[in-house]
Amino acid sequence: QKEVEQDPGPLSVPEGAIVSLNCTYSNSAFQYFMWYRQYSRKGPELLMYTYSSGNKEDGRFTAQVDKSSKYISLFIRDSQPSDSATYLCAMSAGSILTGGGNKLTFGTGTQLKVEL
Amino acid sequence: DTAVSQTPKYLVTQMGNDKSIKCEQNLGHDTMYWYKQDSKKFLKIMFSYNNKELIINETVPNRFSPKSPDKAHLNLHINSLELGDSAVYFCASSRDTGGTEAFFGQGTRLTVV
Protein backbone atom coordinates (compact mmCIF):
# COMPACT_ATOMS: atom_id res chain seq x y z
CA GLN A 1 0.00 0.00 0.00
CA LYS A 2 1.33 3.42 -0.97
CA GLU A 3 1.83 6.01 1.77
CA VAL A 4 -0.34 8.45 -0.16
CA GLU A 5 -3.33 7.37 -2.23
CA GLN A 6 -4.94 9.54 -4.87
CA ASP A 7 -7.55 8.69 -7.48
CA PRO A 8 -5.82 9.09 -10.84
CA GLY A 9 -8.99 10.05 -12.71
CA PRO A 10 -9.37 11.28 -15.35
CA LEU A 11 -12.00 13.62 -13.98
CA SER A 12 -14.03 15.57 -16.52
CA VAL A 13 -16.29 18.45 -15.44
CA PRO A 14 -18.15 21.26 -17.22
CA GLU A 15 -16.90 24.83 -16.94
CA GLY A 16 -18.17 26.50 -13.77
CA ALA A 17 -18.45 23.27 -11.77
CA ILE A 18 -17.05 22.79 -8.29
CA VAL A 19 -14.24 20.26 -8.34
CA SER A 20 -13.25 18.13 -5.37
CA LEU A 21 -9.89 16.39 -5.34
CA ASN A 22 -8.81 14.14 -2.49
CA CYS A 23 -5.94 12.21 -1.02
CA THR A 24 -5.67 9.78 1.84
CA TYR A 25 -2.49 8.86 3.63
CA SER A 26 -1.26 6.35 6.14
CA ASN A 27 1.76 8.04 7.78
CA SER A 28 0.57 9.88 10.89
CA ALA A 29 3.88 11.78 11.00
CA PHE A 30 2.86 13.94 8.04
CA GLN A 31 2.30 17.52 9.19
CA TYR A 32 2.70 19.62 6.06
CA PHE A 33 0.33 19.26 3.16
CA MET A 34 0.61 20.70 -0.31
CA TRP A 35 -1.24 20.69 -3.59
CA TYR A 36 0.67 21.04 -6.82
CA ARG A 37 -0.69 21.63 -10.31
CA GLN A 38 1.19 20.19 -13.27
CA TYR A 39 0.41 21.12 -16.84
CA SER A 40 1.44 18.74 -19.59
CA ARG A 41 5.22 18.70 -20.09
CA LYS A 42 5.80 21.24 -17.31
CA GLY A 43 7.12 21.08 -13.77
CA PRO A 44 4.77 20.89 -10.76
CA GLU A 45 3.72 24.31 -9.53
CA LEU A 46 2.72 24.90 -5.90
CA LEU A 47 -0.94 25.85 -5.45
CA MET A 48 -1.67 25.51 -1.76
CA TYR A 49 0.31 24.80 1.38
CA THR A 50 -1.16 24.02 4.79
CA TYR A 51 0.21 22.95 8.13
CA SER A 52 -1.69 20.45 10.28
CA SER A 53 -5.49 20.28 10.26
CA GLY A 54 -7.79 23.03 9.05
CA ASN A 55 -8.88 24.97 6.00
CA LYS A 56 -7.08 27.45 3.80
CA GLU A 57 -8.60 29.52 1.04
CA ASP A 58 -6.89 31.29 -1.85
CA GLY A 59 -9.15 32.74 -4.50
CA ARG A 60 -11.10 29.91 -6.14
CA PHE A 61 -9.07 27.26 -4.29
CA THR A 62 -9.73 25.82 -0.83
CA ALA A 63 -7.54 23.23 0.84
CA GLN A 64 -8.81 21.13 3.74
CA VAL A 65 -6.82 18.85 6.01
CA ASP A 66 -8.36 16.38 8.44
CA LYS A 67 -5.49 14.71 10.25
CA SER A 68 -7.79 12.57 12.38
CA SER A 69 -9.10 10.90 9.22
CA LYS A 70 -5.79 11.18 7.34
CA TYR A 71 -7.65 12.87 4.50
CA ILE A 72 -6.95 16.03 2.54
CA SER A 73 -9.00 17.79 -0.10
CA LEU A 74 -8.68 20.53 -2.68
CA PHE A 75 -11.79 22.32 -3.87
CA ILE A 76 -11.85 24.41 -7.03
CA ARG A 77 -14.82 26.75 -7.41
CA ASP A 78 -16.05 28.08 -10.75
CA SER A 79 -13.68 25.79 -12.62
CA GLN A 80 -12.18 27.08 -15.86
CA PRO A 81 -10.69 25.31 -18.89
CA SER A 82 -7.32 26.71 -17.78
CA ASP A 83 -7.63 24.55 -14.64
CA SER A 84 -7.23 21.45 -16.83
CA ALA A 85 -4.08 19.81 -15.51
CA THR A 86 -2.86 17.04 -13.23
CA TYR A 87 -3.22 17.83 -9.54
CA LEU A 88 -0.75 16.24 -7.17
CA CYS A 89 -1.05 16.14 -3.42
CA ALA A 90 2.20 16.08 -1.45
CA MET A 91 3.05 15.66 2.21
CA SER A 92 6.00 16.03 4.49
CA ALA A 93 6.79 14.98 8.03
CA GLY A 94 9.00 17.99 8.68
CA SER A 95 12.39 19.56 8.28
CA ILE A 96 15.85 18.18 8.89
CA LEU A 97 15.58 19.92 12.26
CA THR A 98 12.78 17.54 13.24
CA GLY A 99 14.15 14.55 11.42
CA GLY A 100 11.74 14.62 8.49
CA GLY A 101 14.35 15.76 6.04
CA ASN A 102 11.98 17.96 4.03
CA LYS A 103 11.12 14.97 1.89
CA LEU A 104 7.88 15.32 -0.04
CA THR A 105 5.82 12.19 -0.59
CA PHE A 106 3.49 12.60 -3.55
CA GLY A 107 0.21 11.06 -4.56
CA THR A 108 -0.04 9.71 -8.08
CA GLY A 109 -1.94 12.77 -9.28
CA THR A 110 -5.50 13.30 -10.54
CA GLN A 111 -5.94 14.36 -14.15
CA LEU A 112 -8.63 17.03 -14.42
CA LYS A 113 -10.29 18.26 -17.60
CA VAL A 114 -12.64 21.22 -17.53
CA GLU A 115 -14.76 21.35 -20.65
CA LEU A 116 -16.46 24.31 -22.26
CA ASP B 1 13.87 35.05 -14.38
CA THR B 2 13.50 31.30 -13.92
CA ALA B 3 13.67 30.33 -10.24
CA VAL B 4 14.79 26.73 -10.73
CA SER B 5 16.33 25.97 -14.09
CA GLN B 6 17.63 22.68 -15.37
CA THR B 7 19.41 21.68 -18.55
CA PRO B 8 18.98 20.04 -20.89
CA LYS B 9 15.19 19.96 -21.30
CA TYR B 10 15.35 16.86 -23.48
CA LEU B 11 17.99 14.14 -23.57
CA VAL B 12 17.99 11.14 -25.87
CA THR B 13 20.87 8.73 -25.48
CA GLN B 14 21.87 5.13 -25.99
CA MET B 15 22.07 2.44 -23.33
CA GLY B 16 25.41 2.29 -21.60
CA ASN B 17 26.20 5.98 -22.03
CA ASP B 18 26.98 8.40 -19.19
CA LYS B 19 25.06 11.67 -19.00
CA SER B 20 24.65 14.66 -16.71
CA ILE B 21 21.75 16.97 -15.92
CA LYS B 22 22.42 20.37 -14.41
CA CYS B 23 20.26 22.37 -12.03
CA GLU B 24 20.52 25.88 -10.67
CA GLN B 25 18.24 27.86 -8.36
CA ASN B 26 18.28 31.62 -7.80
CA LEU B 27 15.89 31.63 -4.84
CA GLY B 28 18.57 31.62 -2.17
CA HIS B 29 17.27 28.29 -0.86
CA ASP B 30 19.45 26.00 1.21
CA THR B 31 17.93 22.67 0.15
CA MET B 32 17.80 21.11 -3.31
CA TYR B 33 16.32 17.87 -4.56
CA TRP B 34 16.15 15.49 -7.47
CA TYR B 35 12.84 13.78 -8.17
CA LYS B 36 12.01 11.17 -10.80
CA GLN B 37 8.60 11.10 -12.50
CA ASP B 38 7.76 7.84 -14.22
CA SER B 39 5.45 7.23 -17.18
CA LYS B 40 2.45 7.09 -14.83
CA LYS B 41 3.26 10.58 -13.53
CA PHE B 42 4.34 9.28 -10.12
CA LEU B 43 6.90 11.63 -8.55
CA LYS B 44 9.44 10.07 -6.21
CA ILE B 45 12.34 11.68 -4.42
CA MET B 46 15.83 10.49 -5.27
CA PHE B 47 18.20 12.82 -3.41
CA SER B 48 18.23 15.89 -1.23
CA TYR B 49 21.11 18.21 -0.43
CA ASN B 50 21.23 20.85 2.28
CA ASN B 51 24.02 23.40 2.01
CA LYS B 52 25.99 21.07 -0.26
CA GLU B 53 25.59 18.07 2.06
CA LEU B 54 23.65 14.93 1.13
CA ILE B 55 20.74 14.45 3.55
CA ILE B 56 18.40 12.11 1.66
CA ASN B 57 19.36 9.19 -0.55
CA GLU B 58 16.31 7.11 -1.39
CA THR B 59 17.51 3.68 -2.47
CA VAL B 60 18.75 4.89 -5.80
CA PRO B 61 21.24 2.75 -7.79
CA ASN B 62 24.78 3.97 -7.33
CA ARG B 63 24.92 4.64 -11.06
CA PHE B 64 23.23 7.90 -10.06
CA SER B 65 25.57 10.36 -8.42
CA PRO B 66 24.47 13.84 -7.38
CA LYS B 67 27.00 16.62 -6.98
CA SER B 68 26.49 19.99 -5.34
CA PRO B 69 29.36 22.42 -6.00
CA ASP B 70 27.54 25.13 -4.04
CA LYS B 71 24.11 25.52 -2.50
CA ALA B 72 22.66 27.06 -5.67
CA HIS B 73 23.58 24.09 -7.86
CA LEU B 74 22.78 20.41 -7.79
CA ASN B 75 23.80 18.28 -10.74
CA LEU B 76 22.90 14.67 -11.45
CA HIS B 77 25.31 12.33 -13.20
CA ILE B 78 24.11 8.97 -14.45
CA ASN B 79 26.51 6.20 -15.46
CA SER B 80 25.79 3.23 -17.69
CA LEU B 81 22.29 4.33 -18.62
CA GLU B 82 19.59 1.65 -18.79
CA LEU B 83 16.23 1.58 -20.57
CA GLY B 84 14.47 1.79 -17.20
CA ASP B 85 16.11 5.14 -16.50
CA SER B 86 13.84 6.74 -19.08
CA ALA B 87 11.70 9.24 -17.15
CA VAL B 88 11.34 12.93 -16.45
CA TYR B 89 13.81 14.16 -13.83
CA PHE B 90 12.85 17.22 -11.82
CA CYS B 91 15.11 19.40 -9.76
CA ALA B 92 13.53 21.32 -6.88
CA SER B 93 14.55 23.61 -4.04
CA SER B 94 13.11 24.74 -0.72
CA ARG B 95 14.08 26.86 2.27
CA ASP B 96 15.69 25.01 5.13
CA THR B 97 12.88 25.32 7.65
CA GLY B 98 10.07 23.05 8.80
CA GLY B 99 8.38 21.29 5.91
CA THR B 100 8.40 24.26 3.59
CA GLU B 101 7.18 23.92 0.06
CA ALA B 102 9.42 22.95 -2.82
CA PHE B 103 9.72 24.84 -6.09
CA PHE B 104 10.29 22.70 -9.16
CA GLY B 105 12.19 23.16 -12.37
CA GLN B 106 10.68 22.39 -15.76
CA GLY B 107 12.07 18.88 -15.91
CA THR B 108 14.50 16.95 -18.10
CA ARG B 109 12.88 14.30 -20.26
CA LEU B 110 15.41 11.49 -20.52
CA THR B 111 14.89 8.81 -23.15
CA VAL B 112 17.27 5.87 -23.23
CA VAL B 113 17.20 3.89 -26.48
Image: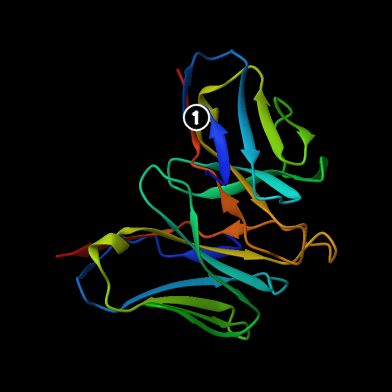
A23 with respect to B81 (left or right): left
Q: Position of residue B109 (x, y in %)?
A: 46, 32
Give the residue furthest to the left.
Answer: A116
Q: Position of residue A104 (x, y in %)?
A: 64, 58
How are the colours assigned in the image? Answer: rainbow
Q: Secondary structure at mark 1?
A: loop
Circle 1: is it few (<14), some (14-19), or many (20+) Cα within 10 Å?
many
Q: Which image quadrant is residue A92 in?
A: bottom right
Q: Position of residue A17 (x, y in %)?
A: 24, 77
Residue at 62%, 35% in the rendered image: B23
Can residue B37 be seen here?
yes
- Above or below, B113 relative to A67: above
For the residue pair B112 and A50, the one nearer the viewer reads as A50
A10 with respect to A50 (left or right): left
Residue at 33%, 61% in the rendered image: A9
For the residue pair A105 and A34, the one nearer the viewer reads as A34
Residue at 35%, 46% in the rendered image: A40
Q: Amino acid at mark 1?
A: Ser
Quarter that holds the N terminus of chain A: bottom right
The residue that disc 1 covers is: B86
- Above or below, A57 relative to A44: below
Q: Position of residue A42 (x, y in %)?
A: 42, 45
- Above or below, A101 relative to A47: above
